[in-house]
Amino acid sequence: MTTESDNPAWPYLVFAEQLEAGFAAHADAVAAYQRGEPIVTACPGDTMTELRRRLELSGDIVDRLEVIFAPTAVVAAFGDATHPCHEAGIRQVADELTTLYDDLITWSRTTMGLTVQPQYTLVARALANFVRKPIRQIEEFCADVRRRADIINADLAANRPVSTNFSLVLSLAMDDLDVAAYNGAMEPFRPTKHRGLFGRRK
């Protein structure tokens, strides 16, 4: 499917096609993630410092979505009332999204495989689960892109009114239960106030 096609649905079909190609390129990593296979990773320096760094890194990866779907990037790729679509731009948006997806999977597997002292194992595993929901949200978004593209294509081919719209709405968020599990695992390592003489807290 290229811009040489006279099919008005081509931008949507190209986007779906490129997303699926990205998923196929990362299929081995996805399968390993789904099997729960970690990537053994040495912990550089202090364990808690590294865990906090990884937590920040997961947020940085998720935040890249705002750049990928920034209004200027979307218009440059998909066009609007005054700008044409560009196949290369559409494919670039798809590639950036599937790269983000792969980075989340790699982050989860390396965090799961972080070599830490036994008392930190539960924390590392809980942290690795932090991105389960964003990973699932991207998978669901890509499946929805294909579904909508096929509906639009079929409607246009049958010369009937298009029965769905094309959506680039995607928001990534951590699952509250995963956040709670991580906070629970971290609880023993948080600074606590100790009782002094006469039961007063210091």
Image: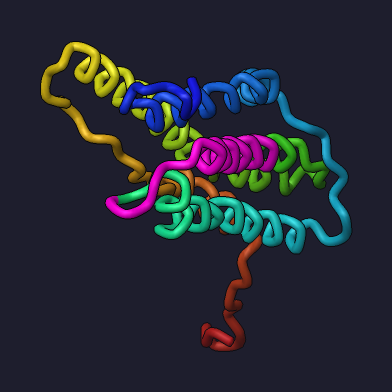
Q: What color scheme is it? A: rainbow
Q: What is the magenta segment's predominant secondary structure?
A: helix
Q: Which residue is drawn at 43% across and 50% down?
A: 74
| Up/down of 134 relative to 153, above or below | below
Percent x, y of residue 44 = 87, 55
Can residue 134 be seen from the camera position used here? yes
Q: Give the range drawn in magenta.
A: 81-107
| Up/down of 184 relative to 36, above or below | below
Q: How many labels does the image show?
A: 0
> Going by the image, does 188 lie left or right of 72?
right
> Is the C terminus in the top left, top right, bottom left or bottom right quadrant?
bottom right
Give whichever of 190, 61 is nearer the camera.
61
Q: Residue at x 61, y 66 (%)?
A: 190
Q: Residue at x 56, y 39 (%)?
A: 88
Percent x, y of residue 97 = 54, 40
Can residue 177 be seen from the camera position used here? no
Task: Verify whether residue 106 appears in magenta.
Answer: yes
Give whichever of 4, 64 is nearer the camera.
4
Percent x, y of residue 115 = 83, 42
Percent x, y of residue 121 = 71, 42
Q: Which residue is drawn at 59% across and 37% down?
A: 95
Q: Residue furthest top?
A: 158
